[in-house]
Amino acid sequence: MLNQAYDKTKLFRIVSGLFILAAAAYLFLLYFVNQRVVAVDVSGCDTASAEKMEYQIEEIKCQYNYVQINGYAYEPGVSLDKADTVLLAWDPVTDTYYRLPTEHVKKEKLSKQADDGFNYDYAQFQSVTLRTKLPSGCRVCIWYRGNGENRLISTDEVIFY
Protein backbone atom coordinates (compact mmCIF):
# COMPACT_ATOMS: atom_id res chain seq x y z
CA MET A 1 0.00 0.00 0.00
CA LEU A 2 2.67 2.49 0.90
CA ASN A 3 4.63 1.76 -2.25
CA GLN A 4 1.78 2.79 -4.62
CA ALA A 5 2.31 5.83 -6.82
CA TYR A 6 0.65 9.09 -5.81
CA ASP A 7 -2.33 9.79 -8.13
CA LYS A 8 -2.81 13.57 -8.38
CA THR A 9 -5.77 13.31 -10.75
CA LYS A 10 -7.81 11.17 -8.37
CA LEU A 11 -7.08 13.45 -5.42
CA PHE A 12 -7.99 16.54 -7.48
CA ARG A 13 -11.34 15.00 -8.42
CA ILE A 14 -12.14 14.10 -4.82
CA VAL A 15 -11.25 17.56 -3.49
CA SER A 16 -13.14 19.28 -6.35
CA GLY A 17 -16.21 17.13 -5.73
CA LEU A 18 -16.19 17.94 -2.02
CA PHE A 19 -15.79 21.65 -2.75
CA ILE A 20 -18.70 21.67 -5.22
CA LEU A 21 -20.89 19.75 -2.77
CA ALA A 22 -20.06 22.17 0.08
CA ALA A 23 -20.68 25.22 -2.15
CA ALA A 24 -24.04 23.84 -3.33
CA ALA A 25 -25.10 23.12 0.26
CA TYR A 26 -24.09 26.65 1.31
CA LEU A 27 -26.04 28.28 -1.55
CA PHE A 28 -29.07 26.10 -0.85
CA LEU A 29 -29.01 27.09 2.84
CA LEU A 30 -28.44 30.77 2.01
CA TYR A 31 -31.40 30.78 -0.38
CA PHE A 32 -33.83 29.39 2.18
CA VAL A 33 -32.54 31.54 5.06
CA ASN A 34 -32.94 34.64 2.89
CA GLN A 35 -36.53 33.68 2.01
CA ARG A 36 -37.73 33.73 5.60
CA VAL A 37 -40.99 35.60 6.01
CA VAL A 38 -42.01 35.69 9.66
CA ALA A 39 -44.76 37.38 11.62
CA VAL A 40 -43.57 40.30 13.76
CA ASP A 41 -45.03 42.38 16.57
CA VAL A 42 -45.06 46.10 15.78
CA SER A 43 -47.14 47.19 18.77
CA GLY A 44 -44.31 49.30 20.22
CA CYS A 45 -43.76 51.33 17.04
CA ASP A 46 -44.64 54.97 16.58
CA THR A 47 -46.65 55.72 13.47
CA ALA A 48 -44.87 58.11 11.15
CA SER A 49 -46.73 60.91 9.47
CA ALA A 50 -46.18 61.89 5.86
CA GLU A 51 -44.97 65.33 6.96
CA LYS A 52 -42.12 63.97 9.09
CA MET A 53 -40.83 61.22 6.78
CA GLU A 54 -39.90 61.11 3.12
CA TYR A 55 -40.72 57.70 1.68
CA GLN A 56 -41.88 56.00 -1.48
CA ILE A 57 -42.44 52.49 -2.75
CA GLU A 58 -41.01 52.96 -6.23
CA GLU A 59 -41.85 49.58 -7.73
CA ILE A 60 -43.67 46.35 -7.00
CA LYS A 61 -43.08 43.59 -9.54
CA CYS A 62 -44.71 40.18 -9.42
CA GLN A 63 -43.14 37.81 -11.92
CA TYR A 64 -41.66 34.33 -12.09
CA ASN A 65 -43.22 33.38 -8.73
CA TYR A 66 -41.42 36.26 -6.94
CA VAL A 67 -42.48 39.62 -5.52
CA GLN A 68 -39.87 42.39 -5.77
CA ILE A 69 -40.34 45.68 -3.92
CA ASN A 70 -38.05 48.72 -4.30
CA GLY A 71 -38.28 52.00 -2.42
CA TYR A 72 -36.76 54.39 0.09
CA ALA A 73 -37.44 56.02 3.45
CA TYR A 74 -35.62 58.75 5.36
CA GLU A 75 -36.21 61.67 7.69
CA PRO A 76 -35.39 64.97 5.97
CA GLY A 77 -32.68 66.93 7.75
CA VAL A 78 -31.22 63.87 9.51
CA SER A 79 -28.31 61.96 7.97
CA LEU A 80 -28.93 58.24 7.88
CA ASP A 81 -25.94 56.94 9.83
CA LYS A 82 -27.39 53.48 10.48
CA ALA A 83 -29.56 51.88 7.82
CA ASP A 84 -32.00 49.52 9.50
CA THR A 85 -35.19 49.69 7.47
CA VAL A 86 -37.35 46.59 7.05
CA LEU A 87 -40.20 46.04 4.64
CA LEU A 88 -43.36 44.57 6.08
CA ALA A 89 -46.45 43.10 4.48
CA TRP A 90 -49.64 43.67 6.46
CA ASP A 91 -52.44 41.18 5.92
CA PRO A 92 -55.69 43.04 6.77
CA VAL A 93 -57.67 39.78 6.91
CA THR A 94 -55.65 38.36 9.82
CA ASP A 95 -54.19 41.71 11.03
CA THR A 96 -50.69 40.21 10.84
CA TYR A 97 -47.45 41.94 9.87
CA TYR A 98 -44.89 39.83 8.01
CA ARG A 99 -41.22 40.83 7.93
CA LEU A 100 -39.79 40.53 4.42
CA PRO A 101 -36.11 39.92 3.70
CA THR A 102 -34.84 43.46 3.07
CA GLU A 103 -31.55 44.55 1.55
CA HIS A 104 -30.21 48.09 1.81
CA VAL A 105 -29.00 49.60 -1.44
CA LYS A 106 -26.44 52.40 -1.56
CA LYS A 107 -27.49 55.01 -4.08
CA GLU A 108 -26.41 58.60 -3.98
CA LYS A 109 -29.34 59.98 -5.96
CA LEU A 110 -31.48 60.77 -2.89
CA SER A 111 -28.72 62.86 -1.30
CA LYS A 112 -28.16 64.68 -4.59
CA GLN A 113 -31.89 65.30 -5.11
CA ALA A 114 -32.40 66.63 -1.60
CA ASP A 115 -29.25 68.81 -1.83
CA ASP A 116 -29.50 69.79 1.84
CA GLY A 117 -26.09 68.61 3.04
CA PHE A 118 -27.39 65.43 4.70
CA ASN A 119 -26.55 61.86 3.75
CA TYR A 120 -29.43 59.65 2.56
CA ASP A 121 -27.28 57.24 0.52
CA TYR A 122 -28.48 54.14 2.41
CA ALA A 123 -32.15 55.08 2.55
CA GLN A 124 -33.00 52.84 -0.41
CA PHE A 125 -34.03 49.23 0.01
CA GLN A 126 -35.28 46.26 -1.92
CA SER A 127 -36.92 42.97 -1.11
CA VAL A 128 -37.38 39.81 -3.14
CA THR A 129 -39.74 37.20 -1.74
CA LEU A 130 -41.41 34.06 -3.01
CA ARG A 131 -45.06 34.76 -3.80
CA THR A 132 -46.15 31.65 -1.94
CA LYS A 133 -44.84 33.14 1.33
CA LEU A 134 -47.38 36.03 1.26
CA PRO A 135 -51.14 36.15 0.95
CA SER A 136 -52.40 38.25 -1.97
CA GLY A 137 -53.80 41.64 -1.00
CA CYS A 138 -51.17 42.50 1.62
CA ARG A 139 -50.38 46.17 2.12
CA VAL A 140 -46.73 47.24 2.04
CA CYS A 141 -45.46 48.92 5.21
CA ILE A 142 -42.04 50.27 6.10
CA TRP A 143 -40.53 49.63 9.52
CA TYR A 144 -38.08 52.51 9.81
CA ARG A 145 -35.46 51.84 12.45
CA GLY A 146 -32.69 54.08 11.12
CA ASN A 147 -30.62 55.97 13.69
CA GLY A 148 -32.35 54.15 16.54
CA GLU A 149 -35.89 55.19 15.58
CA ASN A 150 -38.81 52.77 15.72
CA ARG A 151 -41.48 53.99 13.29
CA LEU A 152 -44.13 52.21 11.29
CA ILE A 153 -44.97 53.81 7.95
CA SER A 154 -48.14 52.59 6.26
CA THR A 155 -48.22 52.99 2.50
CA ASP A 156 -51.12 52.73 0.05
CA GLU A 157 -49.32 50.06 -1.97
CA VAL A 158 -50.92 46.62 -2.20
CA ILE A 159 -49.33 43.37 -3.36
CA PHE A 160 -51.59 41.71 -5.93
CA TYR A 161 -50.70 38.66 -7.96
Image (tube, rainbow, N blue to C red):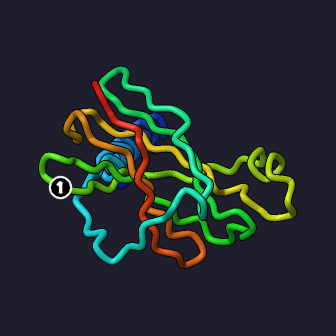
Residue 63 is situated, as x and y percent measured from the top left of the image, at 37, 21
The answer to whether residue 150 is seen in the rendering is: yes
- Using residue 73 as the reference point, say whether residue 91 is left or right of it: left
Residue drawn at point x = 43 percent, y = 27 percent: 61
Q: In the image, is residue 121 above or below residue 62?
A: below
Q: As rendered, which of 26 and 84 lies closer to the eye?
A: 84
Q: In the image, is residue 157 above or below residue 30?
A: above
Residue 152 is situated, as x and y percent measured from the top left of the image, at 42, 63
* Kind of residue at disc 1: Asp
Number of numbered callouts drawn: 1
Residue drawn at point x = 24 percent, y = 35 percent: 137
Residue drawn at point x = 51 percent, y = 41 percent: 57
Say few, some or many: other residues with alpha carbon within 10 Å of mark 1 (under 14 / 14 to 19 / 20 or more).
few
The furthest residue to the left? 94
SS category of the residue bearing label 1 = loop
The furthest residue to the top? 64
Image quadrant assignment for residue 109 = top right
Image quadrant assignment for residue 81 = bottom right
Q: As rendered, which of 83 and 92 lies closer to the eye?
A: 92
Q: As rendered, which of 99 and 35 lies closer to the eye?
A: 99
Q: In the image, is residue 87 above or below residue 160?
A: below
The answer to whether residue 4 is seen in the rendering is: no
Q: Quadrant of the C terminus?
A: top left
User: Which residue bears the numbered disc 1?
Assistant: 95
Q: In the image, is residue 16 above or below residue 112?
A: above
Residue 23 is situated, as x and y percent measured from the top left of the image, at 40, 45
Residue drawn at point x = 51 percent, y = 44 percent: 126
- Using residue 112 as the reference point, say whether residue 86 is left or right of it: left
Q: As rendered, which of 142 and 76 lies closer to the eye?
A: 76
Residue 78 is situated, as x and y percent measured from the top left of the image, at 72, 70
